[in-house]
Image (cartoon, rainbow, N blue to C red):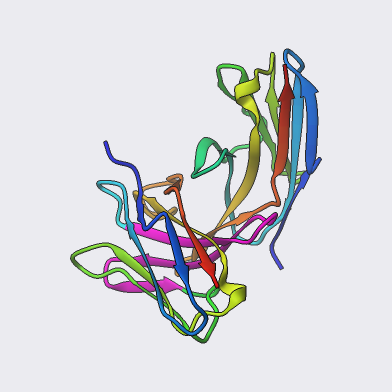
Amino acid sequence: EDKVVQSPLSLVVHEGDTVTLNCSYEVTNFRSLLWYKQEKKAPTFLFMLTSSGIEKKSGRLSSILDKKELFSILNITATQTGDSAVYLCAVASYTDTAQKLVFGQGTRLTINP
Amino acid sequence: NAGVMQNPRHLVRRRGQEARLRCSPMKGHSHVYWYRQLPEEGLKFMVYLQKENIIDESGMPKERFSAEFPKEGPSILRIQQVVRGDSAAYFCASSQSRAGGSGNQPQHFGDGTRLSIL
């Protein structure tokens, strides 16, 4: 059965700290790995990773994928209170007739001022 | 540029009633996906549709649940004879194309419909 596991499940840090969120997966028909940020409403797309070793960066956020070891990390530097959210990792599993995202449980990140 | 639009945002039903959830994909997107999120759990895939076709419904319960994406109008997720266990947030996502076609395209999510069963 396809599985995506995130760790930690919950993380509380102070503003300005750097955090690393982890995502490991066992998914057949792997196509890509995606990170989303979920506050109260819609998961908001952050990154999509398809190739190993290539870092994707957007401001203070960055992410990298290791397809050999089947994991990804999401880094947030100089955290701000607005970074508080649930971060979701998802793996896209596609075949000719099926296409879905398999999600992890999420990491609830709390940034204290 | 409107994103994925879902309505209603909140829906309250009594046990045994029907629930209809609507989703209009982003402009230019022809692929629609429905996911369910139970409290304190991750999103679980339910169904993937293109216009007038169900492509993958492997995540959808066999009974009481159905989905459609007609040629005109929004995609509809329909739950008949709702039970308490159907209470959840239902998210719709859309993408521009299918992976393996013109390449990987991320799925973009709507704000969800929170379904409460009394």
Quarter holding the C terminus of chain A is top right
Span shown in magenta: B31-56
Asked whether A107 falls inside the magenta stretch, the response is no
Q: Is residue A72 visible?
A: no
Residue drawn at x 49%, y 44% as measured from the top left: A42
The vertical placement of A69 against A15, above or below, is below
Say whether residue A101 is left or right of residue B22. right
- Nearer-the-camera pick, A109 or A63: A109
Main SS of the magenta part reads strand
Residue A108 coordinates in the image, percent (x, y): 72, 39
- Nearer-the-camera pick, B97 or A90: A90
Residue drawn at x 64%, y 45% as measured from the top left: A89
The vertical placement of B107 against A79, above or below, is below
Residue A68 coordinates in the image, percent (x, y): 75, 44
Residue drawn at x 71%, y 51% as measured from the top left: A105
- Nearer-the-camera pick, B13 or A87: B13
Q: Is residue A32 visible?
A: yes
Number of callouts: 0
Quarter holding the N terminus of chain A is bottom right
| Location of residue B58 by image quarter | bottom right
Say whether residue B55 is left or right of residue A106. left
Residue A54 coordinates in the image, percent (x, y): 62, 28
Residue B28 coordinates in the image, percent (x, y): 25, 47
| Location of residue A36 by image quarter | top right
Asked whether B51 falls inside the magenta stretch, the response is yes
| Location of residue A111 by image quarter | top right
Residue drawn at x 73%, y 51% as measured from the top left: A25
Say whether residue B14 is left or right of residue A37. left
Say whether residue A52 is left or right of residue B87. right
